Image (cartoon, rainbow, N blue to C red):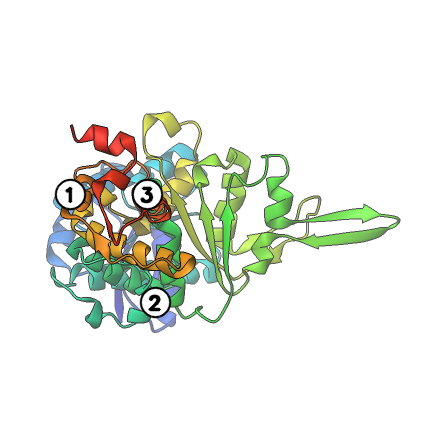
């Protein structure tokens, strides 16, 4: 049985929630009506979840969240609030809240959110318990990650984290510099998930202009010649599978709000239609930008952002994993030799040292391009530093 703490100064609300949740036989309920008692209780009790009111006398919901953050208390929190204050909700999400609900709460919706919060709690505890040094062989779905070539311990740890998250239905935010392999990781997560035999759909958020993107993404419904013409969107292609949405920072604010509804409610409407449709899709989004920065404060929905960042995976840059350069260069060399029919046995030590000293602004994709160009122009069995682009050779002098 999962232990839930309900914090609300309204006795009628806590009485109802206690009776309702106890009747499910899933939860052990503790109720606190005086928020001043919370700090002591957090020290004494082992909890799985907290249901928290925001507007309380003496100690507010935000005060409690700040206290938990300062003490390093990592218990999932679902906020219950009597009014839809977006700024307050964003503050709460930034302090680590799993979700927030407006009173009165629909019983079915409440249970759905509690299930998601507890699932996340179990997932994060599992990730925290992962050993510091792991191997590929200890992955449960090793084949899903085999196309990502690395020997870097941080990357192997990342694979294990990704595999644990893959087993859930939670949305994921992959952050990394340009060319680090965000799509490759998203594909690996899909292959390691229960949705592996379902569609994996890739969408770049800037692939259409902002005016046409909603119809492209959600589909279109319009009257044509006296009858309704329905055009499914790319979202429907991903139904029951995974949708990887890259460059999420380029979405308009209106699209961000609609995407949040897909993630939170599993619902959407086609363009020019008010009919609500259900969708079952695992959402993985990515960006090269720091969306928490001041530059995006008024451009990107804080509400959506902090929901996505609950499951954030950061991919290291190539400069952070330079020991992978020999592995990647060898892999790209073999690929190019198969494609071109050339017989090249390897690289000189100087060639590899120059690469290790280079910053790689475009990361792995840039390395691939460099190797492709070197193979194309090479006239010897060993590729030397002479076949490096001039800007890299000049950078070493």
From the top left corner, tell me how far across and down residue 139 is, in percent. Answer: 24, 70
Q: From mark 1 to mark 2, how far is it between C-alphas?
A: 34 Å
From the top left corner, tell me how far across and down residue 309 is, in percent. Answer: 33, 46
Judge the density around disc 1: few (<14), some (14-19), many (≥20) Cα neighbours within 10 Å.
few
Q: Residue furthest right?
A: 226
SS class, disc 2: helix
**349 on left or right of 144:** left
SS class, disc 1: helix
At horizontal 12% and vertical 50% (from top left) the residue drawn is 40
Disc 1 target residue: 350
**5 on left or right of 99:** left
Please state which of the two labelled residues, at mark 1 or mark 2, is closer to the viewer: 1
Judge the density around disc 3: few (<14), some (14-19), many (≥20) Cα neighbours within 10 Å.
some
Among the two numbered marks 3 and 1 on one chain, the one whose residue lies closer to the N terminus: 1
Question: 336 above or below 102?
Answer: below
From the top left corner, tell me how far across and down residue 242 is, in percent. Answer: 47, 60
Front position in the image: 175 or 28: 175
Do the numbered discs 1 and 2 sit on residues whose CB atoms are within 8 Å? no
Quarter of the image where the C terminus is located = top left
At horizontal 50% and vertical 68% (from top left) the residue drawn is 198
Do the numbered discs 3 and 2 sit on residues whose CB atoms are within 8 Å? no
Which labelled disc corresponds to residue 144? 2
Looking at the rendering, which quadrant does residue 211 occupy?
top right
SS class, disc 3: helix
Residue 286 shows up from this direction: yes
Q: Residue furthest front?
A: 379
From the top left corner, tell me how far across and down residue 164 is, in percent. Answer: 28, 64
Q: From mark 3 to mark 1, how far is it between C-alphas?
A: 15 Å
Among the two numbered marks 1 and 2 on one chain, the one whose residue lies closer to the N terminus: 2
Which labelled disc corresponds to residue 370? 3
Please state which of the two labelled residues, at mark 3 or mark 1, is closer to the viewer: 1
**280 on left or right of 159:** right
């Amino acid at each position: 049985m999962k232990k839930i703490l309900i914090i609300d100064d309204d006795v009628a609300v806590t009485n109802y929630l206690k009776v309702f949740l106890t009747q499910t036989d899933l939860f052990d309920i503790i109720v606190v009506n005086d928020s001043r008692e919370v700090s002591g209780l957090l020290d004494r009790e082992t909890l799985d979840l907290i249901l928290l009111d925001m507007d309380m006398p003496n100690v507010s919901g935000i005060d409690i969240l700040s206290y938990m953050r300062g003490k390093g208390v990592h218990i999932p929190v679902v906020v219950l609030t009597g009014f839809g204050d977006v700024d307050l909700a964003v503050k709460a999400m930034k302090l680590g809240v799993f979700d927030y609900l407006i009173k009165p709460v629909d019983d079915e919706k409440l249970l759905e959110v509690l299930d998601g919060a507890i699932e996340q709690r179990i997932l994060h505890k599992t990730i925290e318990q992962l050993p510091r040094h792991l191997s590929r062989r200890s992955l449960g779905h090793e084949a899903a990650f085999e196309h990502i070539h690395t020997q870097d311990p941080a990357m192997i740890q990342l694979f294990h984290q990704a595999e644990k998250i893959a087993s859930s239905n939670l949305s994921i935010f992959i952050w990394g510099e340009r060319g680090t392999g965000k799509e490759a990781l998203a594909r690996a997560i899909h292959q390691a998930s229960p949705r592996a035999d379902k569609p994996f759909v890739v969408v770049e958020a800037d692939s259409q202009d902002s005016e046409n993107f909603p119809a492209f993404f959600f589909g279109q419904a319009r009257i044509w010649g006296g009858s309704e013409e329905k055009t499914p969107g790319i979202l429907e292609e991903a139904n029951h599978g995974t949708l990887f949405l890259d460059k999420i920072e380029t979405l308009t604010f209106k699209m961000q709000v609609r995407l949040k509804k897909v993630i939170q409610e599993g619902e959407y409407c086609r363009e020019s239609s008010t009919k609500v449709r259900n969708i079952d899709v695992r959402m993985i989004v990515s960006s090269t930008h720091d969306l928490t920065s001041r530059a995006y404060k008024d451009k990107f929905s804080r509400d959506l952002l902090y929901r996505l960042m609950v499951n954030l995976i950061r991919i290291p840059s190539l400069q952070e994993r330079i020991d992978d350069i020999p592995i990647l260069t060898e892999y790209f060399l073999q690929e190019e030799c198969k494609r071109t029919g050339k017989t090249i046995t390897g690289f000189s030590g100087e060639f590899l040292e120059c690469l290790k000293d280079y910053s790689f602004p475009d990361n792995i994709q840039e390395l691939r391009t460099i190797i492709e160009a070197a193979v194309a122009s090479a006239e010897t069995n060993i590729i030397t530093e002479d076949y490096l682009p001039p800007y890299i050779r000049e950078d070493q002098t």
